[in-house]
């Protein structure tokens, strides 16, 4: 096994040599020789020494132990280390680095095993706790100023262009999805290890430009964000934080890990009616909650309905609401121009100049319900006999027997009453919730348990505590 010593990319700064050189294991204290790892494709991370008595280490195995003990992969026992004033404060097993594969991807954690503590970026992790490691994180031993290593992620995704405020609080990881306004990334809250989603929005998407316009957007968004912060509903993605820079917004949101409703429907072909009902009921509750606060979603579609888990009967969370009002109506319309599949007829008829009333969300709910039940949309650009706009404004859709014969008349009736071109006759969300199809005690009980898991359910996730 060769170990890279004294290697430091320019991003580390400081006084370390910038050249890479490797030495055989037997020249370095504390490493086994059976593991023939060199810098290469198997390397998932690197520790760069920033304490004088430490050496660099390429991370190849899934787990490494660090300490004074003879069994540690990286032993603190070179003569230089022994002379260090902190040497006596190092534990036999001081910390462990682990590469863990989870449902959200592969992450690297530092587990603190020492009472004197291991510090990541100056913060004590604490014995028995773990901290997710991000690119450029600093590891110190026993004292926050006793810096030992800088951890560099193997993929070396440089986050130095992220704002300081964001980096202080979160470690950003992989991309979860891409939307009209930008990327959504997985992130970890520093200290708590709590996973969150960070939505990164370039402000220029919201305005034609100009500093004053951008400042106005910031002010408007802040006002809106304060409203969003106050929204609390189990079927609505919880807003957690906002970091606002001159050109970018970082919106920190509750993370959900079951993917988009859209993908679930594509994967399964369609949902069975009881699942469609359970999901639809939760969506309707979320939209009722928003409408009760006088907020219109405006952009309801299966891509904006997220599922909490892979399980069949799962909690549903509506996302991506509120901010769309900052996109002017023409832009909004343009984003739909390709396939305005979910757009209400009154918006098309007024070319986007009409009021975005709550009724447009009810129309979109109707489209979503239709798709869930049969796996294809009621209005489609693929239809040869009529262009899409006409289909929508004329309410031209049907329920072909080949697809709908197994669907209950109650479900079909609700779809019809939501996909009603006449706004005045279209059901409100409260009326939809009162529709006979949704008066299903069993389904409502399931939804209640999902939304409000009471005592006796699984305890909350305790990601950071190692038993
Ligand atoms: P946009 O508003 O720019 O269209 P979205 O908010 O729809 O972007 O997000 C794009 C994608 O990112 C989503 O479809 C989803 O896959 C993922 N995503 C968004 N928010 C979350 C979240 N809170 N948890 C997990 N994934 C998310």
Image (cartoon, rainbow, N blue to C red):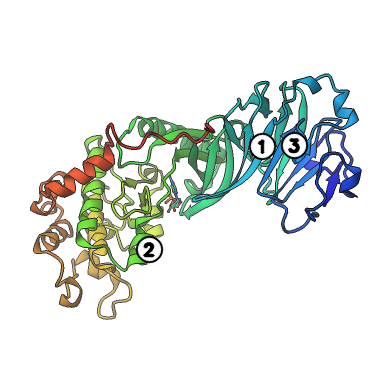
Report whether 409 appears left or right of 294: left
First reached walking from the N terminus: tag 3 or tag 1 = 1
Q: Is residue 72 above or below residue 116?
A: below
Q: Does any atom of ligand 1 lie closer than 8 Å to the CB of label 3? A: no
Task: Identify the residue at image location x=13%, y=63%.
Answer: 412
Q: Which residue is mark 1?
A: 96
Q: Secondary structure at mark 3?
A: strand
Q: Residues within 10 Å of mark 2 (few under 14, many from 20)?
A: few
Front tag of 3 and 1: 1
Q: Nearer the viewer, residue 58 or 236?
A: 58
Residue 173 position in % (x across, y down): 58, 46
Callout 2–callout 1 Cβ contact below 8 Å: no
Residue 241 position in % (x across, y down): 47, 33
Measure the alpha-carbon separation of dots 3 and 1: 15 Å
Which label sits on residue 150?
3
Front tag of 2 and 3: 3
Q: Secondary structure at mark 2?
A: helix
Measure the alpha-carbon separation of dots 2 and 3: 49 Å
């Amino acid at each position: 096994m060769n170990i890279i010593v004294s290697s430091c990319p320019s991003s580390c700064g400081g006084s370390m040599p910038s050249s890479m050189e490797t030495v055989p294991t037997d020249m370095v204290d504390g490493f086994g020789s059976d593991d023939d790892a060199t810098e290469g494709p198997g390397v998932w991370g690197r520790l760069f020494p920033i304490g004088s008595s430490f050496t660099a280490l390429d991370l190849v195995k899934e787990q490494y132990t660090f300490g004074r003990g003879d069994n540690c992969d990286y032993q603190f026992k070179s003569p230089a280390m022994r002379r260090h004033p902190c040497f006596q404060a190092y534990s036999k097993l001081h910390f462990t680095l682990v590469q863990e594969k989870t449902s959200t991807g592969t992450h690297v954690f530092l587990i603190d095993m020492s009472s004197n503590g291991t510090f990541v970026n100056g913060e004590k992790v604490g014995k028995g706790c773990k901290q997710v490691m991000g690119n450029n994180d600093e590891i110190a031993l026993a004292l926050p100023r006793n810096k030992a290593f800088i951890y560099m992620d193997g993929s070396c995704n440089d986050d130095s262009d992220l704002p300081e405020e964001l980096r202080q609080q979160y470690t950003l990881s992989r991309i979860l999805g891409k939307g009209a306004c930008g990327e959504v990334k997985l992130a970890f809250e520093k200290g708590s290890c709590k996973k969150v989603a960070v939505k990164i929005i370039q402000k220029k998407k919201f305005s034609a430009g100009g500093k004053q316009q951008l400042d106005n957007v910031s002010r408007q968004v802040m006002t809106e964000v304060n409203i969003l912060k106050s929204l609390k509903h189990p079927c609505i993605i919880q807003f957690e934080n906002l970091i606002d820079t001159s050109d970018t917004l970082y919106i920190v949101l509750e993370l959900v890990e079951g993917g988009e409703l859209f993908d679930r429907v594509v994967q399964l072909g369609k949902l069975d009616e009881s699942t469609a009902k359970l999901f639809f009921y939760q969506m309707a509750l979320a939209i009722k909650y928003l409408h009760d606060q006088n907020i219109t979603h405006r952009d309801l579609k299966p891509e904006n309905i997220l599922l909490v888990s892979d399980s069949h009967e799962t909690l549903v969370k509506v996302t991506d609401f509120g901010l769309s009002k900052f996109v002017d109506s023409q832009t909004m319309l343009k984003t739909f121009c390709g396939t305005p599949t979910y757009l209400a007829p009154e918006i098309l008829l007024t070319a986007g100049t009409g009021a975005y009333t709550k009724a447009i969300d009810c129309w979109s709910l109707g489209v979503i319900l239709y798709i869930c039940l049969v796996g294809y949309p009621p209005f489609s650009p693929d239809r040869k006999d009529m262009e899409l706009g006409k289909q929508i404004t004329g309410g031209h859709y049907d329920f072909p027997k080949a697809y709908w014969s197994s669907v209950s008349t109650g479900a079909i009736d609700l779809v019809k009453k939501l996909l009603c071109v006449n706004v005045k006759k279209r059901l409100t969300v409260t009326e939809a919730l009162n529709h006979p199809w949704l008066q299903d005690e069993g389904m409502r009980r399931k939804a209640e348990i999902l939304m409000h898991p009471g005592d006796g359910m699984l305890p909350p996730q305790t990601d950071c505590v190692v038993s």
